[in-house]
Structure formats: C-alpha cells, structure tokens
Image (cartoon, rainbow, N blue to C red):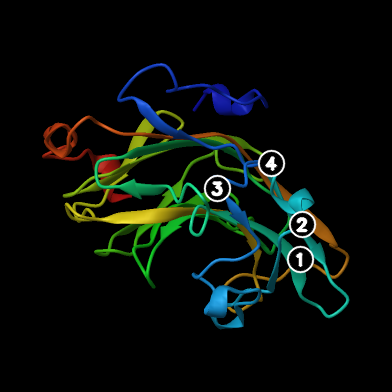
Amino acid sequence: MQNAAFDGTPSAEGNGSGPPIVFTADFASTRQWVAGRSWAYPNGGPVNPGDNKLDHLTADPAYSRSGVFRATLRKDGRWDTGLLTTEGSEEAFTVRTGDVLEARVRLPHEAGAWPAIWTWRDGGQEVDVFEYHPDNPDLLELTNHVRGGNSYYRDPSVRPGGWIDLRVRFGSRSVVWWVNGSQVFADRQGVGRSWHAYLIVNLSVSAGRYHPPPAPHVKEMSYEVHNLAVRRPATLSEAESDEPETVSDADGL
C-alpha cells in the first residue's frame, strides 16, 4: 500500500476538513498536559508491574515534552519512561462521544517498546487508539475496553521505524479506526452517549510476560507523535448520523 506514511515526514492529512478542531496537542504545554503521573497506574505511579510494565514514570521534560516519548534503562532494572496525560492538568481536556482523534506517529524499533495513545477516567473508560509491539512488526492493536471490541490489524505499512496516520471516531454505537486513510475496523460496540475520558500518550516497556523485554544491550528507545488533534461535531446527533450502519470486510480483521 503506497501512502504518505513512507515519506518519513510528518503529515497534515485530515487537518483541513471535517468537524472543527477543539484540541491541538502542544506537548510542551503544562496547561494541557501533566507529565510523569497517571491514575491509570496504581497510586498514580511511578510503577505498574501488575500490568507487565517495567516503567518508572518520569516528569523529566526530555522524555515527553518534545513529542518524542523516550525510555532509558535505570540501574535498578526499571526504565525511566515518558507519559503525558490531560488528567489533572489545568485545562483537563476530555474526549467525548462523537469526537474524532487524529495523530501521526513514528513507531519504535526496539523489542520491548510499548507505545500507545489511549483514554482513561475513574478506573476505566479506556479506548486504545493504538498499541504496538515491535516483536509483531506489522501489527497494530486497536481496542475498545469500554464495551468490548478489538482488532489485530496487519499491514506492510506498519513496521518498526515507520510513520503511520491514525484516525479514530469514538462513536456511541461503534468506535471506528482508520490507518493511513483507510477504514480498518468498526467495533459495533461504541462507547455510549455519555462517555468521556482523558487522553494519555506514553511509551511503556514490556516486562516479558506477553512480549519480550528489551535485549540486554538496549539502553534506550523512543517513538514520536505528531499532529495530534481532536475534532468535535457541533451536536451528538450530527456525530451519530455519520456513524456507519454497515461495515466493510476490513472491519472484521
């Protein structure tokens, strides 16, 4: 599949049309984002071994504030990792039913890297815009944990070091994912009409239970996020009128 994801540069695809943008990520902004803690982690962090993570969250801006999310090995065997969330920030932005999130990411190379963009609020409300593990080099994990629904999407454009464009509509009746401009999954479950949740962007490190940990010689890793924005229809009824009643064969991948 030939598309802009192969040119190695940030894309502005999708930023010129559709519902108005209500949130444009400025990762350097302390009004928008809190660094190095999240209530998706026990007690807000900094560690989460129960989720098979070697993470030790850090607020050091070098690990997240440029849009390059980094992880580096610590002497104790854990990894300092970058995480940003809108939860607890001054603006406290939440995505809500009907919103469309768009982002462009450069995937990491190293086995053990676990990048993700996802949502969280009050112990749940999680929708994974994407998760990626380089040991499955052509596969993205797309998951609605709110009502259940997931896809393991494979494509040659998904590869270590590759750029991909992501788009997700958080529909009340169906959460729909696009990758590089093509619809790839609609879960037919949705998030309901009153759903809302905070955004999280982070790089975790796998501890080895489900995916291999980093090789002994690997001391650092990173992935990059560009052009993250959220669009919002004027009304929920407008958003629902645009939700697909049927889905293509690709949606069942």
In contact (CB < 8 Å): disc 2 and disc 1: yes
Q: For the residue labelled by badge 1, is the local secondary structure a helix, a strand or a loop?
A: strand
Tell me the distance, in whole angstroms, between the alpha carbons under discs 3 and 1. Answer: 26 Å
Disc 4: which residue: 161
Q: Which mark is residue 80?
A: 1
Marked residue nearer the N-terminal end (2 or 1): 2
> Height in image: 4 above or below 64?
above
Tell me the distance, in whole angstroms, between the alpha carbons under discs 2 and 4. Answer: 24 Å
Residue 149 seen by the camera: yes
**Residue at image coords 28%, 60%:** 149
Residue 181 in the image: x percent, y percent?
41, 28
- Amino acid type of the residue that numbered disc 1 sits on in the rendered structure: Asp
**116 left or right, relative to 208:** left
**170 left or right, relative to 68:** left
Which is closer to the viewer, label 3 or label 1? 1
Q: Which mark is residue 138?
A: 3
| Quadrant in the picture for residue 247 | top left
Marked residue nearer the N-terminal end (2 or 4): 2
Q: For the residue labelled by badge 3, is the local secondary structure a helix, a strand or a loop?
A: loop
Tell me the distance, in whole angstroms, between the alpha carbons under discs 1 and 4. Answer: 21 Å
Residue 142 in the image: x percent, y percent?
40, 53
Residue 154 in the image: x percent, y percent?
46, 47
